[in-house]
């Protein structure tokens, strides 16, 4: 196993492939938080409305921060998937195949299958198109991403 700091590219390699949530999505969530704050500061709503909007604003703020933390990075050493709460580091020696699967959290995504049969599913929000796209095009995009990930795998000699 390679000793490396989680989230840092390996030394002596090219820039890692990286996928993140599109930046406009957390930005839009932050705009909702600003609107909720402005409503509470300037409109002087009733206590019920104030409590409801504060809970809504807090939840939206948490969703924005968590969305900014999610990413997928691939380099010659392995694959790093950062979920909402924790990162999962998979060196290439543990990965048997990379495949596209359906019905993961209601969507298609890329699955990293370990040699022991267990797997790690990449969050669909990282890889799915952010604009309306036909299902065949979205699937073709995921297959292209799976091929890109496989090209980073070091060749065995």
Image (tube, helix red, strand yellow):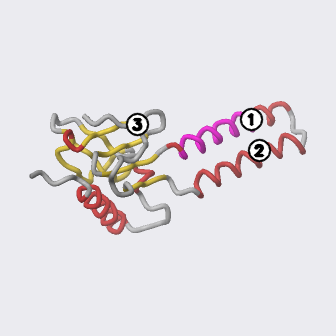
Whichever of callouts 1 and 3 sits on the residue coming sooner in the sequence is 3
Foreground of the two, 35 or 82: 82
Q: Residue furthest left?
A: 157
Q: Quadrant of residue 65?
A: top right
Q: Which residue is mark 1?
A: 54
Quadrant containing the N terminus is top left
Whichever of callouts 3 and 2 sits on the residue coming sooner in the sequence is 3
Task: Reply yes or no: does residue 91 show up in magenta.
Answer: no
Q: Residue furthest front?
A: 12
Tag 1, which secondary structure? helix
State how many labels appear.
Answer: 3
Q: In the rendered structure, are the residues bearing label 3 and label 2 in contact, judged by CB atoms less than 8 Å apart?
A: no
Query: Disc 1 and disc 3: Cα gap in Å?
Result: 37 Å
Residue at the image point whose x is 65% and y is 41% from the top: 61
Crowd class of label 1 (few under 14; some 14 to 19; many from 20; radius 10 Å) = some
Q: Is residue 72 left or right of residue 149?
A: right
Residue 63: x, y in percent? 58, 41
Residue at the image point whose x is 26% and y is 45% from the top: 112
Residue 27: x, y in percent? 64, 53
Q: Which residue is mark 2?
A: 36
Q: Nearer the viewer, mark 1 or mark 3?
A: 3
Q: Which residue is mark 3?
A: 5
Q: Which residues are magenta?
A: 52-68
Q: In the rendered structure, are the residues bearing label 2 and label 1 in contact, judged by CB atoms less than 8 Å apart?
A: yes
Crowd class of label 2 (few under 14; some 14 to 19; many from 20; radius 10 Å) = many
Residue 45: x, y in percent? 87, 39
């Amino acid at each position: 196993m390679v000793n490396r700091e989680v989230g840092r590219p390996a030394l002596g390699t090219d820039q890692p492939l990286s996928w993140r949530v599109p930046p406009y999505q957390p930005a839009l969530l932050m705009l909702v938080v600003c609107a909720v704050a402005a409503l509470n500061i300037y409109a002087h709503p009733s206590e019920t409305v104030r409590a409801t909007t504060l809970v809504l604003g807090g939840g939206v703020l948490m969703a924005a921060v968590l969305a900014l933390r999610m990413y997928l990075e691939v380099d010659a050493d392995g694959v790093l998937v950062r979920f909402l709460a924790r990162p999962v580091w998979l060196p290439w020696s543990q990965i048997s195949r990379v495949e596209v699967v359906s019905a993961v959290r209601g969507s298609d995504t890329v699955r990293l299958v370990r040699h022991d049969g267990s797997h790690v599913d990449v969050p669909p929000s990282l890889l799915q198109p952010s604009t309306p796209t036909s299902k065949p095009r979205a699937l073709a995009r995921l297959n292209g991403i799976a091929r890109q990930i496989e090209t980073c795998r070091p060749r065995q000699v």
